[in-house]
Amino acid sequence: MTVRILVTGDLHIGRRPSHVPEVELAERTSPARMWEAIVSCAITERVDAVMLSGDIVDHDNRFYEATGPLERGILRLAEADIPTYAVAGNHDWDVFPRILNLLETPQFHFLGQGGHWEETHLERDGKRLLRIVGWSFPARHVRQSPLLEFPYNADPNIPTVGLLHADVDAPTSEYAPVRLPELQSHNLSLWVLGHIHKPEYWSSETGAHVLYPGSPQALSPNETGVHGPWLIELEGSRSVLCRQLPMSLIRYEQREVDLSGIDTPEAFDTRVNEAVFAALKNVVASDRSPELLSLRIRFVGTTPLYGRIDSLARQLSDLKRSHGGVQAQIDQCTNLTRPAIDLDELIRRNDPAGLLARTLIALEQNKINPSLNTLLSDTATCLTNLHVHPTYLALVDHDPVPDREMAREILIRQVQRLLEAICRQHAEPEESTL
């Protein structure tokens, strides 16, 4: 018999998608609205169960904001005779137990409270159709693998789904680190994981299939690609079919635009418009289009316009293109182009331009001498201090922590700009004085 379940995780009810220009769209794309859409989808698809893999609530201080939507959705599912199975993640480890106490329905099953593995069964007409095993975060940080104490084997008669919030192949993680081979070695039908917002699926011919459903509603420019819940069909202990339902109303994407040979502002505008329209057409061709395509553009290539790219890019915030009902915006531009200068000639000079040229080549080739090593270390330290400063915490909460590689990339861009400015000054004719 085929069992159909709808799975999702990392909803983060209480948060709002970032870099959304219109207040009304920001409200319509909130995780709470996505949860309502997922509930409606589960009812329409007549699934046998809904499973939640943790971090459904953003933080414990979002308790009151999240309780209403979550409770309404679970009760709607219960009225449709669809049970909900959930585990807690690092964000909602102490919130889910409180919500559980408010729900008056036997159709909601919170598994693994306190960091103890627990199993239950999905039954229909007294017959067991599916076994679910789950583990929940007992605290905000868990540094050991929950699989060290995993007590279950597969049931050869019915499919078994493992529900777990964990960090795969990140051994130093503070968020329940597990290894992919370790997960696949347990002969379950499927692991449904939470924590990572990017969807990812690993199939296995001999062991358990592993799925990160990811955030159903994309929440930041770091969460690129297609997002939405997953429809799972299980038949027997080994047959597993997984299909993502692209329901996110926002699509964040990154695009690289090559400006090689571009030497006028008009040509720059044409190249950018071509790139945006190509991105729009690609999104519209997908199964279910979002309402907003938010683009981050990386300019590359060698161009005489190098020194003007930042100024030209600032005007792109006003660019609005639409196609097939999808609106595009440019959220951010990064200038990774190279100035049109001859480094081979400059490195032979014993002046500031020559010193900068040699520094640039050393940074690009990662040939770090002692003085550059000190510069890199100092830069990385300054960036880290800014990243953790209380003033900026709300802005960098989901950005990567600065490291030496990030410092090297920033220094490359700064040296390029300084070198291009010096060369441009030397190339400009001096004003004659009378």
Image (cartoon, helix red, strand yellow):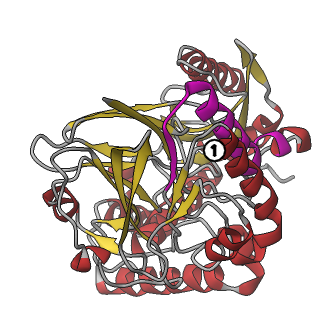
Residue at the (61%, 60%) spot, across then down: 56
Q: Nearer the viewer, residue 32 or 370?
A: 32
Q: Which residue is mark 1?
A: 217
Query: Is 50 part of what is drawn in magenta?
Result: yes
Residue 30's spot in the image, x, y percent? 76, 48
Q: Residue furthest front?
A: 126
**Where are the magenta residues, as a range?**
27-52
Q: Is residue 358 left or right of residue 77?
A: left
Query: In the figure, 184 relative to 61: above or below?
Result: above
Can residue 272 be seen in the rendering of this structure? yes
Q: Nearer the viewer, residue 348 or 196?
A: 196
Can residue 429 be seen in the rendering of this structure? no
Residue 273's spot in the image, x, y percent? 67, 21
Q: Nearer the viewer, residue 51 or 349?
A: 51
Query: In the figure, 67 relative to 296: above or below?
Result: below
Residue 280's spot in the image, x, y percent? 62, 20
Q: Residues within 10 Å of mark 1 (few under 14, many from 20)?
A: many
Q: Quadrant of residue 311?
A: top right
- The local secondary structure at tag 1 comes to loop
Residue at the (82%, 44%) spot, across then down: 26
